[in-house]
Amino acid sequence: MDSIGGSATVSRQICHEDCFSGQEANVKVGEEQLQDHGEKLTSSKSEDSSNNKEEGVIESVKAEMGQVREENERLKKMVQQMEKDYQSLKFHFFDLLGQETCKKSEDSTPSSDETEESELVSLCLGRTPSESKKYEKGSNSSRSSRENEDLEAGLTLGLDSKFQMSTELESNPSPENSLDAKEDEAGETWPPSKILKRNIDDEDAKQGDVKRARVCVRARCETPTINDGCQWRKYGQKIAKGNPCPRAYYRCTVIPKCPVRKQVQRCAEDMSILITTYEGIHNHPLPVSATAMASTTSAAASMLLSGSSASQPTLIGSHASATQLNGLSFNNLYDSSTTKQFYIANNPSSPLCPTITLDLTASPSTASSATPPFNWFSSSFTSPSRFPSTSLNFPSPAVWSNGYQNSYGSSLSNLGPYMEKNHQQQALTETLTKAIISDPSFRTVIAAAISSMVAGNGSASASSSQGNQRAAENFGQNLRLGEANNEAVSTSSLNLQNGKGCAPSYISGLSSSSQIGLLQSHVLPSCVLNSASLAANNNNKDQKN
DNA sequence: CGTGTTTGACCCGCGC
DNA sequence: GCGCGGGTCAAACACG
């Protein structure tokens, strides 16, 4: 009877679609066991037919069996009904999505208030600032309709996360960002406000007067370019003022009209540092190996957005870290014994076009700040600067990029920038984040689970670079390390560079489990972030380097 | 021959 | 208006 009750219990579970078949199986198993039980009872009856008392028991058991059978039938029907409801809801959901898309494409009027926009911005990655601009200015465009669509979807992801600038951000350009200014003067970053208006790709043309954000990745890399998993074609090279090293211009060639471009330049002061700046949203499915950088830059972009919300420092808590760092990916492809830092800064030459710098070159010593977790933003947000230079140190290279790929049903691969992230996932993110923050044991469990997954799958990365397996293993190690010791965040085990080039694609070898993806994209950042520290002051130091 | 790179010319925005 | 600097174009070239 226990088994029957067990199956009934399982049948009552309301879970994912995958559960339904299992539930039905349980129901069937329960019935079989029920029959076996009845046969045994019948045989026992034949053996001892003289015992009337037992007969009574048997009768009662039979009656009970009948009831249980009815219950089983009822539960089976419930399961079937639930399955139908699920399918119906699923279709309805996608139908609504489709309707919403059509509706928004017709109604591109920027009726949404700025508060709403800001809210949406904070939840979405990979947005083009131009679209935000359109909201503000009330211009109509097909892009804005797509933007709305993206907003519905909740998340877009570009290799170089273009994203909307918040109104606040655009209306209050900071002329005071000295750090980025220095970089610009040195020609180390990609300042190009001018490029914005020169981008005449089909998509960009639709975007009109584009003010877009970029993500600049500083990494120690011996190879000419970072192997970010995408396919690039060099279309130009320039000697930038202040930097003897030529600046190379690359264009994504995965599909002919992909608007994504990147600039690659060596740091003038440290030739080992490669500065790669991404711009644009892929309008095609990304190779799995490319999702790493996509996530990284998206996360960086989201960080920039968080920086734009400086007036709301309370955002920068667990919630913000979970939401805005969603999918954050700091890959071990670069210099590894380092911490990862973000510089969130506007470009003085282009106040409306902020650039976030993901600095993967900082020395470990600079990261050993005693700054408590979740305090990274404190100094930067108290800065008078509109776009204060902000750094984030991350103790371990996370491999959450696949989280996008996996947790969202490969929507990244299928939809590219139009990746979907629903509110449930956001809620899940917050919930998990809170749980992680509040419960160290939970962190431990998550860390152990993921590290074991990563380590277990590292060898499967046939399509990735040589360091992938090692990266995965290191990741797992460092996840644990970060869990165990918040300060020992930068270790030699993070070093993936090993002189063989910079390839984040090791992520591609990870498990395709959606659970892993969720953990990678939502949980891991929180895990690591919680053990991370921020040395805001180091930021300036690194920027000057 | 197809694909990718090189490189000088050109365009454009910005500052003076 | 002019010059400067950054970004892009496209012909020439290299390579497999």
Image (cartoon, coloured by chain):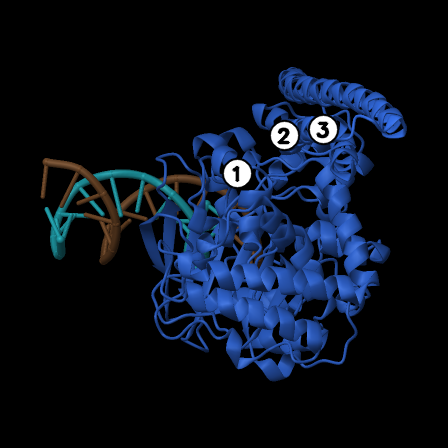
Chain colours: A blue, B brown, C cyan
**Is label 1 or label 2 in front?**
2
Q: Residue furthest front?
A: A50
> Mark 3 Cα within 10 Å, few/some/many (few <14, many 20+)?
many
Q: Earlier in the sequence, mark 3 or mark 2?
A: 2
Which residue corresponds to mark 3? Answer: A34
Place of residue A90 in the rendered image (x, y in percent of width and height, measured from the top left): 66, 22
Proximity of marks 3 and 1: CB atoms separated by less than 8 Å: no
Could you give the CA–CA distance between mark 3 and mark 2, rounded to whole angstroms? Answer: 14 Å
Q: Amino acid at mark 3?
A: Leu
Side of A473 relative to A168 (left or right): left
- Residue drawn where x is 76% and y is 27% of the image: A45
Q: Are marks 3 and 1 on the same chain?
A: yes
- Residue drawn where x is 63% and y is 51% of the image: A521
Proximity of marks 3 and 2: CB atoms separated by less than 8 Å: no
Place of residue C3 in the rendered image (x, y in percent of width and height, measured from the top left): 41, 57
Q: Are marks 1 and 2 on the same chain?
A: yes
Question: Against A184, is A335 above or below?
Answer: below
For the residue pair A295 and A472, the one nearer the viewer reads as: A472
Place of residue A174 in the rendered image (x, y in percent of width and height, measured from the top left): 71, 57
Which residue corresponds to mark 1? Answer: A410
Q: Are marks 3 and 2 on the same chain?
A: yes
Name the quadrant of the N terminus of chain A.
top right
> Mark 1 Cα within 10 Å, few/some/many (few <14, many 20+)?
many
Residue A388 visible here = no
What numbered label is drawn on residue A25?
A: 2
SS at circle 3: helix
